[in-house]
Image (tube, rainbow, N blue to C red):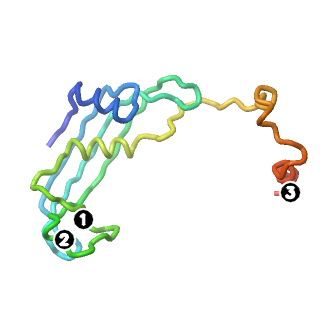
Amino acid sequence: MSVQATPAERLALCQRFALEDLSALEARVRIERARDAQGGPAIRVQAVLHAEVMQICVVTLEPFPVEVDDEFTILFQFAANMPEGAIAEDAPEPLDTPEIDVGELIAQHLALALEPHPRRPGAVLESGGGEAQFPELAVRPNSPFAKLGQLKHKM
């Protein structure tokens, strides 16, 4: 199936994930019956998503465009069919209802695919002038940090 976020959904995701803009979010999703590692019945969800996002650069605080392309596969199993204590890394996700919220899966994986500290290409954090601008942050000559600074050239 093909899924596309509506303008209202994109606006809600912008607010939820603190995005400047989300001009497109679409995914191709395949849902099929499957088996878990022990041969029990499961449901496999595979998706390829594409998003066009406007994020804020952490250096310049200016918006810049980002294209997100990601794919994921999740195996679900009804909680009633899961063995006791199945909390292994490769264990299926428990499913309590017969419905899977595909839109929420796509939204969650979009959030995981976004850079948490986005930096516009070419953005450089200016260093220098910090001590003059913020004298309280200057390293004191008799502090332990001054001693560590003297060791820096030996590394």
Upstream in sequence: badge 2 or badge 3 = 2
For residue 7, side relative to residue 17 (left or right): left
Separation of marks 2 and 1 at Cα, in angstroms: 8 Å
- Quadrant of the image containing the C terminus: bottom right
Crowd around label 1: few <14 · some 14–19 · many ≥20 (10 Å): many
List the residue tagged with mark 3: 154
For residue 100, side relative to residue 72 (left or right): left
Q: As shown in the figure, which amino acid type bears the numbered disc 1?
A: Pro
Upstream in sequence: badge 2 or badge 1 = 2
- Quadrant of the image containing the N terminus: top left
Q: Nearer the viewer, residue 95 or 2?
A: 95
For residue 61, side relative to residue 112 (left or right): right
Q: Residue at x 34, y 67 (%)?
A: 89
Residue 32 x, y percent position in the rendering: 13, 57
Find numbered disc 3 in the image and state the secondary structure of the residue it sits on: helix
List the residue tagged with mark 2: 82
- Circle 2 or circle 3, nearest the eye: 2
Q: Are marks 2 and 1 in contact (CB under 8 Å)?
A: yes
Q: As shown in the figure, which amino acid type bears the numbered disc 2?
A: Met
Residue 58 x, y percent position in the rendering: 55, 32
Q: As shown in the figure, which amino acid type bears the numbered disc 3?
A: Lys
